[in-house]
Protein backbone atom coordinates (compact mmCIF):
# COMPACT_ATOMS: atom_id res chain seq x y z
CA UNK A 1 0.00 0.00 0.00
CA UNK A 2 2.99 2.31 0.06
CA UNK A 3 2.48 3.10 -3.64
CA UNK A 4 -0.94 4.50 -2.89
CA UNK A 5 0.35 6.71 -0.10
CA UNK A 6 3.26 8.07 -2.11
CA UNK A 7 1.47 8.33 -5.45
CA UNK A 8 -2.00 9.39 -4.39
CA UNK A 9 -3.63 11.78 -6.83
CA UNK A 10 -0.49 11.91 -8.92
CA UNK A 11 -0.76 13.18 -12.49
CA UNK A 12 1.64 13.38 -15.40
CA UNK A 13 2.29 9.64 -15.40
CA UNK A 14 3.89 8.24 -18.56
CA UNK A 15 6.39 5.66 -19.76
CA UNK A 16 9.24 8.07 -18.96
CA UNK A 17 8.53 7.92 -15.23
CA UNK A 18 7.39 4.28 -15.37
CA UNK A 19 3.75 5.31 -14.99
CA UNK A 20 4.43 7.10 -11.68
CA UNK A 21 6.73 4.30 -10.54
CA UNK A 22 4.06 1.67 -11.25
CA UNK A 23 1.22 3.35 -9.36
CA UNK A 24 -0.74 4.24 -12.52
CA UNK A 25 -2.03 0.72 -13.09
CA UNK A 26 -4.41 1.58 -15.94
CA UNK A 27 -1.78 3.81 -17.61
CA UNK A 28 -4.24 6.64 -18.15
CA UNK A 29 -1.83 9.37 -16.99
CA UNK A 30 -2.85 9.75 -13.36
CA UNK A 31 -3.17 7.82 -10.12
CA UNK A 32 -6.75 7.80 -8.92
CA UNK A 33 -9.49 5.65 -7.44
CA UNK A 34 -9.54 3.43 -10.52
CA UNK A 35 -5.91 2.47 -9.89
CA UNK A 36 -6.65 1.80 -6.23
CA UNK A 37 -9.59 -0.39 -7.27
CA UNK A 38 -7.38 -2.37 -9.65
CA UNK A 39 -4.76 -2.80 -6.93
CA UNK A 40 -7.29 -4.04 -4.39
CA UNK A 41 -8.91 -6.36 -6.94
CA UNK A 42 -5.59 -8.07 -7.67
CA UNK A 43 -4.47 -8.01 -4.05
CA UNK A 44 -7.59 -9.86 -2.94
CA UNK A 45 -7.48 -12.34 -5.84
CA UNK A 46 -6.91 -15.82 -4.49
CA UNK A 47 -3.93 -17.96 -5.45
CA UNK A 48 -4.81 -21.44 -6.79
CA UNK A 49 -3.74 -24.32 -4.55
CA UNK A 50 -1.29 -25.81 -7.07
CA UNK A 51 0.18 -22.48 -8.22
CA UNK A 52 3.97 -22.53 -7.65
CA UNK A 53 5.08 -19.65 -5.47
CA UNK A 54 8.29 -17.87 -6.34
Image (cartoon, rainbow, N blue to C red):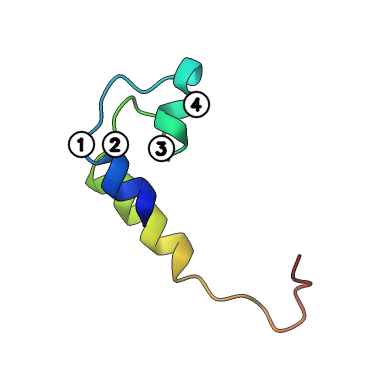
| Numbered disc 2: secondary structure | loop
Residue with the mark numbered 2: 31
Secondary structure of residue under mark 1: loop
Mark 3 falls on what kind of element? loop
Measure how far apart labels 3 and 1 are at the Cα level.
Answer: 14 Å
Asked if disc 2 and disc 1 are in contact, CB closer than 8 Å, the reply is yes
- Badge 3: residue crowd in 10 Å (few <14, some 14–19, many ≥20): some
Q: Name the foreground residue: 4 vs 25.
A: 4
Residue 18, numbered label: 4
Q: Earlier in the sequence, mark 4 or mark 1?
A: 1
Which residue, given by chain and number where applicable, does mark 3 sit on? 26
Residue at image coords 44%, 71%: 44
Number of marks in picture: 4
| Residue 17 position (above or below residue 7) | above
Left or right, 42 with respect to 38, comes to right
Alpha carbons under labels 4 and 1: distance apart: 16 Å
Q: Position of residue 46 (x, y in %)?
A: 55, 76
Q: Quadrant location of the C terminus?
A: bottom right
Q: Image point 67% across, 78% down: which residue? A: 48
What is the distance, in whole Å, between disc 3 and disc 4 at their CAs? Answer: 12 Å
Q: Nearer the viewer, mark 3 or mark 4?
A: 4
Q: CA distance from mark 2 to mark 4?
A: 12 Å
Left or right? Give the position of 42 relative to 11.
Answer: right
Question: Badge 1 is on which residue?
Answer: 9
Tell me the quadrant of the picture where the N terminus can be found: bottom left
Mark 3 or mark 1, whichever is nearer to me: 1
Amino acid sequence: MTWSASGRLCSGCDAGNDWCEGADLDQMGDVDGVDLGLFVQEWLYWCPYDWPLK
